[in-house]
Amino acid sequence: MADENNQEAQQAQGPVLQMQRVFLKDISFESPRSPMIFQEEWKPELGLELNTKSRQVGENVYEVVLEITVNVKNEGEPAYLVQVQQGGLFTISGLEEQQLHHALGAFCPGTLFPYARENIDAIVVKGSFSPVMLAPINFDALYLESLQKQQPEAETTQ
């Protein structure tokens, strides 16, 4: 009976999307040309790669991992490489399947991005390089772009 009351209360309050925890799942920093690189004129070229993964880990609980790779070269030569996997646990309920996919693919990674950006900046500075201030990212636009790319692929496989 308590379970029924709890479910009714949850339905009455509407959808739930709540962050439970933010955690650093993995971080890597490589500077293969240190210390010689500090003797060179600094003209950095920054490459950025983003990926997200999500999985259900409990009832209405999802792990979302934002993977960011920053590859910096100086005059075509490797300067440093940073890889961060910023994770988060989210409680999500009361959403339709399409809304759930959008939350996991756009909202949750967007929530994790500032934490990942801070971790990237901190490790780069500890490597004795200038801070990396990654610009904000529109995860909604990236999510929609991803959906648009998947539609032609689904049509050609049918």
Image: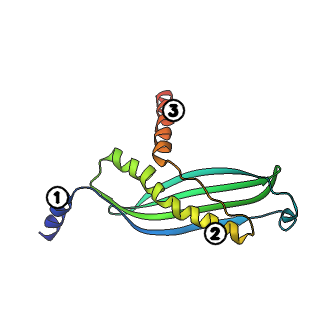
- Image location of residue 92, percent across then percent down: 33, 59
Kindly identify the residue that appears in the image at 70 percent across and 51 percent down. Answer: 46
Classify residue 111 as left or right of residue 9. right
Query: Counting residues from the N terminus, which is met first, the one under dot 3 or under dot 2?
Result: 2
Where 20 sits versus 149, above or below?
below
Query: Counting residues from the N terminus, which is met first, the one under dot 2 or under dot 1?
Result: 1
Q: Amino acid at mark 3?
A: Glu
Q: Which mark is residue 153?
A: 3
Q: Classify mark 1: residues with Cα within 10 Å, few (<14), some (14-19) or many (20+).
A: few
Query: Counting residues from the N terminus, which is met first, the one under dot 3 or under dot 1?
Result: 1
Q: Classify mark 2: residues with Cα within 10 Å, few (<14), some (14-19) or many (20+).
A: few
Q: Which mark is residue 4?
A: none
Front of the two marks 3 and 1: 1
Q: Which mark is residue 122?
A: 2
Kindly identify the residue that appears in the image at 42 percent across and 53 percent down. Answer: 107
Q: Amino acid at mark 1?
A: Ala
User: What colour-coding does the image apply?
Assistant: rainbow
- Image location of residue 158, percent across then percent down: 46, 28
Q: 46 and 27: which one is in front? A: 46
Q: 4 and 139: which one is in front? A: 139
- Image location of residue 82, percent across then percent down: 68, 61
Q: Amino acid at mark 2?
A: Ala
Classify residue 113 as left or right of residue 28. left
Kindly identify the residue that appears in the image at 73 percent across and 55 percent down. Answer: 72
Regarding residue 34, the answer to whether it shows in the image is yes
Q: Secondary structure at mark 2?
A: helix
Regarding residue 54, the answer to whether it shows in the image is no
Q: Secondary structure at mark 3?
A: helix
